[in-house]
């Protein structure tokens, strides 16, 4: 009997992709999935968040049940969600909140022409609610008082070095952030190489030691959760607001202490090139209870104020010798 010829390499069948848990969901009213979820992405190369060319959204999360990957595809009228990993069921259960089902845009009334225009043009903008405080808090801490590029680089390096491959078909390209024990094992040199100073690294360590106690803050109102969060050294109003916007879908959590936001809001609503937090809060006062939503709409509709000097240069990356 002749020996069969070996199969050409190009004819080797691809390994069968394991099917995850599936849920379909149809929102009430218009929904812009991409704009709703974009605040969860920490830069275009975020290892925990990807958007394919066809609009499919991938998100890797550290849930209370463990690591999980969520894929969203289909039309906004009928979305198919597929999830993998120990956290799959948790992610699917939280899908409506993630896509703004708990958000009530009808409570918002535009008070400025530019806000009215943005509100009309973006009816599908919802405020996401992840229910994951620690996941939102850690990258917000990394963003304290550094350029956006530096913070995104730190998040990316730490996830690839110390996170775990995302469950499901994107294991080679996506990462789930470490659990509390994983963060505690990050050596000081790796923080340094990622450009994270001792103060921010220490704040992350204090947060992960609380772990589940921080995520339990999702059961509280945004105001109470923010107050408790700020009792932790290294977490102030800026970091708390950035966290609550994502973990709680907090419509009124306006970011104060930001380098650029007051100027952007002031320029959009008054034409002034330079504004401070007090001016921004005065301008947003008519939107009390909805100030974060108003700020997001302004950022969508209004150009940035003209720059009067060079951009802040990022610090050079630290390299191994």
Image (cartoon, rainbow, N blue to C red):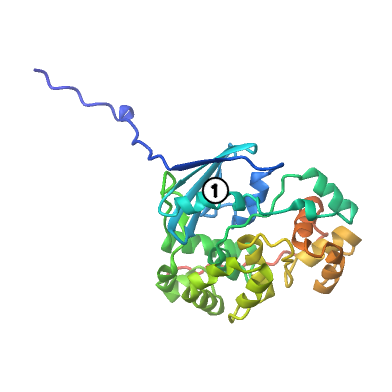
Residue 246 image-quadrant placement: bottom right
Residue 238 image position (x, y, % from top left):
68, 71
The quarter of the picture where residue 282 lies is: bottom right
Q: Is residue 193 left or right of residue 293?
A: left
Q: Position of residue 273 (x, y in %)?
A: 86, 64
Is 69 drawn above or below residue 234 in the view shown?
above
* Quarter of the image with the C terminus in it: bottom left
Q: Is residue 275 visible?
A: no
Mark 1 burial class by Cα count in 10 Å: few <14, some 14-19, many 20+: many
The residue to which callout 1 is attached is 50
The answer to whether residue 83 of the structure is visible from this angle is: yes
Query: What residue lies at 32% left-to-right and 27% top-to-bottom?
Result: 11
Residue drawn at x 54%, y 69% is 216
Q: Element under label 1?
A: strand
Q: Quadrant of the N terminus?
A: top left
Write the residue at 86% across / 61% down: 267
Indicate the position of residue 108 as horizontal and vertical percent values: 80, 55
């Amino acid at each position: 009997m002749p020996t069969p010829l070996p199969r050409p390499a190009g004819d080797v069948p691809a390994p069968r992709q394991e099917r995850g848990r599936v849920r379909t969901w149809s929102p009430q009213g218009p929904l812009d999935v991409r704009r709703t979820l974009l605040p969860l992405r920490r830069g275009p190369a975020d290892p925990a968040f990807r958007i394919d060319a066809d609009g499919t959204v991938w998100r890797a999360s550290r849930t209370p049940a463990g690591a999980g990957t969520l894929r969203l595809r289909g039309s906004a009228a009928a979305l198919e969600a597929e999830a993998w990993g120990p956290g799959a069921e948790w992610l699917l259960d939280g899908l409506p909140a993630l896509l703004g089902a708990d958000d009530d845009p009808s409570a918002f009334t535009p008070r400025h022409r530019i806000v009215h225009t943005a509100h009309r043009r973006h009816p599908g903008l919802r405020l996401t609610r992840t229910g994951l405080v620690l996941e939102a808090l850690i990258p917000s801490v990394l963003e304290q008082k550094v350029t956006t590029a530096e913070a995104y680089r730190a998040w990316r390096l730490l996830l690839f070095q110390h996170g775990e491959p995302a469950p499901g078909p994107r294991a080679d390209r996506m990462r789930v952030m470490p659990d509390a024990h994983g963060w505690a094992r990050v050596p000081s040199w790796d923080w340094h190489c990622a450009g994270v100073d001792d103060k921010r690294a220490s704040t992350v360590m204090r947060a992960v030691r609380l772990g589940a106690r921080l995520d339990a803050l999702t059961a509280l109102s945004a105001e109470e959760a923010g107050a408790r969060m700020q009792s932790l050294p290294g977490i102030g109003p800026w970091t708390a607001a950035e966290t609550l916007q994502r973990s709680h879908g907090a419509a009124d959590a306006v970011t104060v202490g930001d380098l650029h936001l007051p100027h952007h809001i002031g320029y959009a609503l008054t034409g002034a090139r330079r504004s401070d937090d007090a001016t921004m809060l005065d301008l947003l006062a008519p939107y009390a209870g909805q100030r974060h939503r108003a700020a997001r709409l302004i950022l969508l509709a209004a150009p940035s104020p003209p720059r009067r000097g060079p951009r802040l240069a990022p610090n050079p990356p630290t390299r191994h010798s």
